[in-house]
Image: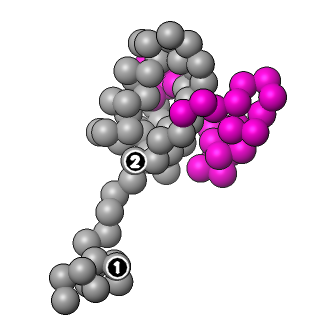
Amino acid sequence: MSGTAGVIGLGIMGGAMARHLVKAGFTVHGFDPSADAVEAARGDGVETLASAAAVAEKRGSLSAPCQIRWRSAPWQRKSPRHQRRAA
C-alpha cells in the first residue's frame, strides 16, 4: 500500500501510527510541538513540518495530497465540554 498521510501529534500514539504508516509504504507528514517527538519521528522516516497548519495544508497539495489525516493530541480533562458531561 502507498499514499500520503498527515499526522498531527507525534507522541506515544500518533508517533506509533506514523511509524506504522511509514512501514506500510505511506509518505507521512507530521508535526508535534515537542522537539523530542519530532526527532524520534524523523528517525522513523516521517517528514516533519513546522506547524499543524502546514500538515493540514498538505491535504490540498497536488504533488502529495494527504489521503489520511490523523490528529493525536492530549485531551484536557478540565475542558468546559468535559465539565458539562460530568455535571
**Residue 68 has which mark?**
none
Query: From the viewer's perspective, is 12 left or right of 40?
Result: left
The residue that appears at 44% across and 13% down in the rendered structure is: 24
Determine whether the residue tagged by mark 2 lies in a helix, strand or loop.
loop
The residue that appears at 31% across and 69% down in the rendered structure is: 76
Query: From the viewer's perspective, is 58 left or right of 84?
Result: right
Q: Is residue 8 visible?
A: yes
Query: From the viewer's perspective, is 8 left or right of 15?
Result: right
Is 43 drawn above or below residue 52 in the view shown?
A: above
**Residue 72 has which mark?**
2
Label 1 sits on residue: 81
Viewer-nearest residue: 78 or 41: 78
Amino acid type of disc 2? Ser
Residue range in magenta is 40-68
Q: Quadrant of the C terminus?
A: bottom left
Viewer-nearest residue: 82 or 8: 82
Query: Given this view, does label 1 or label 2 mark the residue nearer the observer?
Result: 1
Magenta segment includes 66:
yes
Magenta segment includes 42:
yes
